[in-house]
Amino acid sequence: MFGRKKKDKSLTVQGEKAVKPLEVQTGRVLPERRKKASRPPDPYFTKLAKVTRRTRYAVTVILVVFTVVMAFLFSNEITGEKLKLLLRNASFSFPGEEVAYTTVRYDADRTMDYAAYREYFAVGTGAGLRLYDHRGNVALQVKAKMNAPAIDSGKDYILMYDREGKTYLVCNSVTELFEGSETFPIYGADVCDNGRYLILTSSSTYLCVMKIYNRSFKLIKEISVDRYPIAAELSDDGNRLLLLCVTNTQDGKIEGHVCIYDVGGEAKLTGEVVTDGVPLAGKLTSKGAAILYHDRVAFYGNAGADHGSVGFEGKTPGFFTFNEKTAAVSFEINSVEGSYEVLCCDLEKEEFSRRIEHTGRIAGLNLSDGLLFICGGARTVAVDLESGKTRVMTVSMPEKIMPGAGDAIFFCYRDKAENMRESVEIRELTENSGAQAAENENETPDRA
């Protein structure tokens, strides 16, 4: 009726004594473990370990004492500015990761400027500078108050200055490195790839003062000219300087000056060209300089020798754009029919390279990665300067078009920047709408 009660093998308590359960005897006998005899440590390695440990302690103590003594002796030399200089060559990038931009979004401001710096996209506003990475995240933010911010970048530094203001910033991808100011307004600035940068300003004595700073932000050269400055730029290696300026003659006429300086050693004028036309824009080339006038693109050597020019056949230029290899200038042919023309010059070969006919209003020109972008309204036409073929994109007119890291082509707007490389390449290539583009390729405009 009732099952058998199992025997409890756990401990039981009888009175105040604990009774162990019965031990189960088995016929298996476990062998005893034999401990291996340990060998005595090798005296050589024992001695070596002691010496190494003592040496480590001694070096640590010496470094601590050295740091304390140096900090005490040179306490006046340790400043926040000099600590920033330690970071001037530092920069973070994206090793082993493909930098593929899509869309970078930011807040619009009253005045803005944009630049590509290494793998980053830079936006300058009246509140300061921001660097965005390829995911659209803020990599660096520097606060500054500027009324008209403008940005220029090189391989090492990015420089933002207040146009017609008096302050500027020098940064890299890690931090703000230097904050500078001038007594008189800044008309322009340029930073080259080796870290040198130029500030174009004036003084109480001269209308034009060009100050060249080294990568440690020290003033190394200063050139003063009593003429009205138009533009100035340094070569990529920082050894040459181009200045465009004008002055008034005694009979009241305007006289243009193109000045080329050698600033690699002592700052000296190597070539100067005086003309009765105003130089509108210019670019240093490997042979000298290419200068845009109202009637031609002229080429000069480093010593000022005239290498010839490409004339505009009596047409008045509208928009123009320069980069290291190409100059492009637009002309209105027939305002009623809306026909325009763009003339391209090869700055290295110092010759005319291509004529492009365009239908529709032109509101801006941009050069980027071998492509000429003709902007107007809701349509942007990209022209391959090598083949002459075109790509048509129906997009809003950007404020600026520029190349970025990798093969990115940024279309910059007030609140975003878009990488349009894919949009350019997926369009089917068509022959240039101007059928005469290929025919006129061999027809060189007036060349003085």
Image: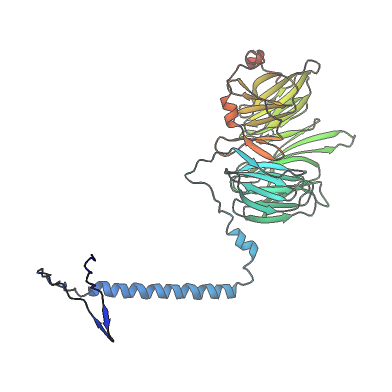
Considering depth in this image, is 93 or 7 the residue closer to the camera?
A: 7
Residue 189 visible, this orientation: no
Residue at (70, 22) in percent of width and height: 342
Across and down, in percent, residue 298 comes to 71, 28
Residue placed most toward the observer, 243 or 166:
166
Q: Position of residue 8 (x, y in %)?
A: 24, 72
* Vertical placement of residue 262 versus 63, above or below: above
Res 151 visible: yes
Q: Nearer the viewer, residue 150 or 355?
A: 150
Residue farthest along the right direction in this orientation: 251
Residue 340 placed where, x, y %?
74, 19
Image height of 163 relative to 406, above or below: below
Quadrant in which the C terminus is drawn: top right
Image quadrant in which the N terminus is located: bottom left
Q: Which corner quadrant of the image does residue 179 belong to?
A: bottom right
Of 308 and 102, the residue lying toward us = 102
In the rendered view, does 335 fall on the left or right side of 356? right
Q: Quadrant of residue 182?
A: bottom right
Residue at 87% of width from left, 33% of height from top?
Answer: 253
Question: Tell me, what colour scheme is on the image?
Answer: rainbow
Left or right? Give the position of 12 relative to 178. left
Identify the residue shown where x is 32% and y is 75%: 50
Residue 14, percent from left and from top? 26, 84
State the residue lying farthest toward the bottom. Answer: 16
Tell me where residue 90 sits by quadrant. bottom right
Residue with the most extreme left position: 27
Exactly how many numbered labels are in the figure?
Answer: 0
